[in-house]
Amino acid sequence: MRLLLTLLLAGFLGLAQAQEIARADLPGAARETLQLIAQGGPFPYKRDGVVFQNREKLLPLQPRGYYLEYTVTTPGVRHRGARRIVCGGVTRQQPAACYYTADHYRSFRKIIE
């Protein structure tokens, strides 16, 4: 019971360790988005590169402006869809960490090489 409470509190405070996903296991569109981030664009959507506020506090807590979000295109969808990559760090093109969400910020997986 104590462990469950600790895990729930850590998740609530944004301290829970995100699940991981290897870059090679990402959908092709997500790998393309990572390439665009490394190149500095151009991005297909106007909202790509805007500040992600981490309101859900599922990512490690950082100052406002640390995280930026990018759209991962979804085949067969005419709008932005639910898939995103959120990156954080000092530089846009070489972020310290990136996270993938396929469910519009309900869950994140840390992208590892």
Image (cartoon, grey):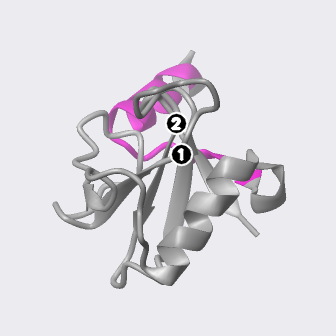
Residue designated by label 1: 72
Choose between 2 and 89: the one closer to the eye: 89
Instruction: Give how far apart the Cα atoms at labels 2 and 1 are.
Output: 5 Å
The three-letter code of the residue at mark 1 reads Val
Residue at the image point whose x is 41% and y is 48% from the top? 59
Instruction: Indicate the quadrant where residue 73 lies.
Output: top right
Residue at the image point whose x is 64% and y is 61% from the top? 32
Residue 61 against residue 41 in the figure, above or below = above
Residue designated by label 2: 83
| Mark 1 Cα-neighbour bin, 10 Å: few <14, some 14–19, many ≥20 | many
Is residue 85 shown in magenta? no
Bounds of the magenta segment: 4-21
* Mark 2 in CB contact with mark 1 (< 8 angstroms): yes
Choose between 70 and 3: the one closer to the eye: 70
Find numbered disc 1 in the image and state the secondary structure of the residue it sits on. loop
Note whether residue 20 is visible: no
